[in-house]
Amino acid sequence: MGISHLPTRVQVGIVFEAEYEVLWLAAPEVFVIAKQVDSKGRIALDKAYAGSTMLVERRGDGTIVLRPAVTVPANEAWLWKNKKALAMVQEGLEEARQGRRAEAPNLAAAAKLASRIKD
């Protein structure tokens, strides 16, 4: 793939570091860097991404988009799918940050009540 997919308003073109690495400033917050794919199909990213998880989006036109991601354990995924439960947890965390706490239940009184209940 060539560079024809890049915006036509390229403001800066600089060759730096190793061969094949070219930096374009496509927009004020977007940098495009051409990287050489190695013989095993790999591309080296900046050290800032070392150890991170990436979602790899492969689009129909051949474009590949990498998006940083966080992995959620399967037994916790339900919370992120349940908007009401997530809102309740977030509200509780905010209340805790503000120092608003509820009184703990009186377990001794609850045990006394439970002992009086007949099966």
Image (cartoon, rainbow, N blue to C red):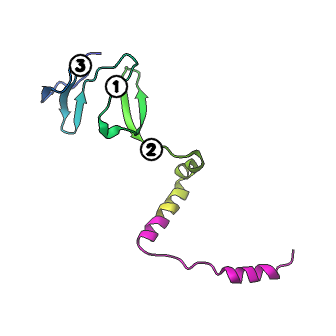
The residue depicted at 40 percent of the width and 25 percent of the height is: 59
Quadrant housing the C terminus: bottom right
Determine the secondary structure under disc 2.
Answer: loop
First along the sequence among labels 2 and 3: 3
The answer to whether residue 21 is left or right of residue 107 is left
Q: Residues within 10 Å of mark 2 (few under 14, many from 20)?
A: few
Residue 89 image point, x, y percent: 51, 61
**Disc 2 marks which residue?**
70
Q: Going by the picture, which residue comes out furthest to the right?
A: 119
Amino acid beneath label 2: Val
CA separation, marks 3 and 1?
17 Å
Magenta stretch in the rendered image: 92-119
Give the spatial CA distance, label 2 vs label 3. 31 Å
Q: Identify the residue under disc 1.
A: 43
Quarter of the N terminus within the rendering: top left
- Locate residue 51, reporting x and y percent: 40, 39
Q: Amino acid at mark 3?
A: Ile
Relative to 63, is 119 on the left or the right? right
